[in-house]
Image (cartoon, helix red, strand yellow):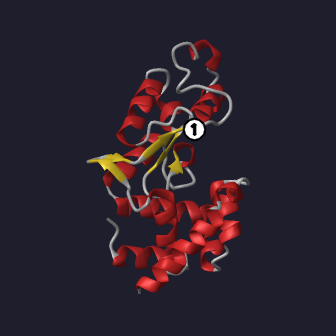
Amino acid sequence: MISENEYKTAAILINCDPQAVKSVTDVESHNRGFVAPNKPLILFEGHIFWRQLKKRGIDPLKYVKNNEDILYVKWTKQYYKGGIKEYDRLNKAIKINKDAALASASYGLFQLMGFNYQTCGCSSVDEFVTKNSQSEAQQLLLFCAFLKKNKWDIYLHNKDWANFAKHYNGPLYAQNNYDKKLEMAYNKNIKKM
């Protein structure tokens, strides 16, 4: 669990209110960075795996048979297993290509995708996964690096939930009321002070 001091340090790093950072953990992961010791919360994305294989010059069509639950062209939540069972899907993908597989999952409290490892200040996706596996405090530092590199920290500073949601969660954020959930979480956190 992230301490108040760690939230305050993060808030200084990205120049925002600690409650704004807390609102992201509330919405992204319900404040749960791990599913087991050294196993960060993950969600494996088969459509990303498809792209990551292609990016590495590997034809995903050769691997689809018996891998339909980890390899598909368009996003779907049909194959999500949730919790520790997502590691079954990840491990199955690792057998095809480790780097592409690790780059195709989101990790930890902030559900940052593995392919963002460089934006988070890591030299490899392995380093990114290792850091996510160490602690929630390390996940928080990766999140801060990610926001600063993308210059999205301004949206948390300004409590501009719509722009934060659009950039962090994608252009379809409104379908899930992501911005409204962030604002509600922020208001709830402010009341707890």
Q: Position of residue 67 (x, y in %)?
A: 52, 19
**Residue at figure coordinates x 71%, y 67% from the top left:** 163
Instruction: Give the structural element (helix, strand or loop) at label 1.
Output: loop
Quadrant where the image shows the C terminus: bottom left
**Residue at figure coordinates x 43%, y 53% from the top left:** 108
> Can you say whether 17 is above or below 146 in the image?
below
Residue at numbered disc 1: 77
Q: Position of residue 28 (x, y in %)?
A: 50, 58
Q: What's the residue type where badge 1 is placed?
A: Lys
Q: Position of residue 52 (x, y in %)?
A: 61, 32
Judge whether residue 59 can be spotted in this image. no
In the image, taking residue 128 as reference, residue 47 lies left or right, namely: right
In the image, taking residue 136 as reference, residue 116 lies left or right, namely: right
Quadrant where the image shows the N terminus: bottom left
Q: Which residue reaches farthest right?
A: 171
Local packing at callout 1 (Cα closer than 10 Å; few below 14, some 14-19, many 20+) is few
Judge whether residue 72 can be spotted in this image. yes
Q: Nearer the viewer, residue 122 or 61?
A: 61
